[in-house]
Amino acid sequence: MYTYNLLVTFHQNQRGHAEQEVRDRMKDLGVFLEELSLCDVEGVFLVQAGGDAKVLVSQLKRMCKEDPAQFLYTHHWVPIERWVPSNLREMKDAVIELARGIGPDESWMMHLHKRHVVMHHDDLITELTDPINLGRVDLEDPDKIVAVEVLGGMTGLSLLTRHEMLDVNKVRVVSGAGKV
């Protein structure tokens, strides 16, 4: 079972630059980088960083807004709270447990990236969102995000706020820096 608390995506042809970017951003924040591993799935690093990964990513997001040029080689930074095998029953159980953190008056959405699994994206979204009967769905500006990162045989999951997840290109576009 994985113990990594952070998943970082990058373009597979920029692995060396992306790895240095991860190391540099951790150093900038004074975060101890316990482990940085290349995943079996291309374009994904699995990271064990010291401290709370949600706090770390919110700090990285703020850093990206202030100076987007510091994020040229990485794409997504996603905290991971829980790892489960990529079978539907275990994924559903984990999603149901995480969704308990959605308040009755809160909005939510699911953020799903699947890699190396045969189930169709829309079918997987339907299967995983159907059991969530809390709050209301908001795909534009949700209070909570159920993050699901399927990496072949393992799936990382988290319940996040929009500040605890970094999509570098979205931040770069908003800041006027343009996509990488």
Image (tube, rainbow, N blue to C red):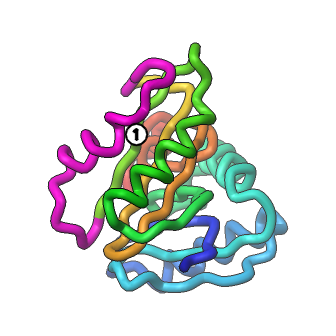
Which residue type carries mark 1? Met
Q: Quadrant of the C terminus?
A: bottom left
Would you place residue 87 above or below residue 145 in this image?
below
Position of residue 131 measured from the top left corner of the image (x, y, whole percent) = 38, 36
- Residue 36, quarter of picture: bottom right
Residue 2 part of the magenta-drawn span: no
In this view, the residue farthest toward the top is 105
> At 54% from the left edge and 56% from the top edge, which residue is drawn?
78
Residue underneath mark 1: 110
**74 above or below 142?**
below
Q: Position of residue 89 (x, y in %)?
A: 36, 57
Q: Tell me where residue 6 appears, x and y as whole percent.
A: 59, 65
Residue bounds of the magenta highlight: 115-139
Q: Is residue 132 magenta?
A: yes
Q: Is residue 170 above or below residue 135?
A: below
Q: Nearer the viewer, residue 11 or 128?
A: 128
Residue drawn where x is 41% and y is 56% of the image: 91
Mark 1 residue element: strand
Please indicate whether residue 28 sits to the left or right of residue 161 in the image.
right
Residue 56 occupies quadrant: bottom right
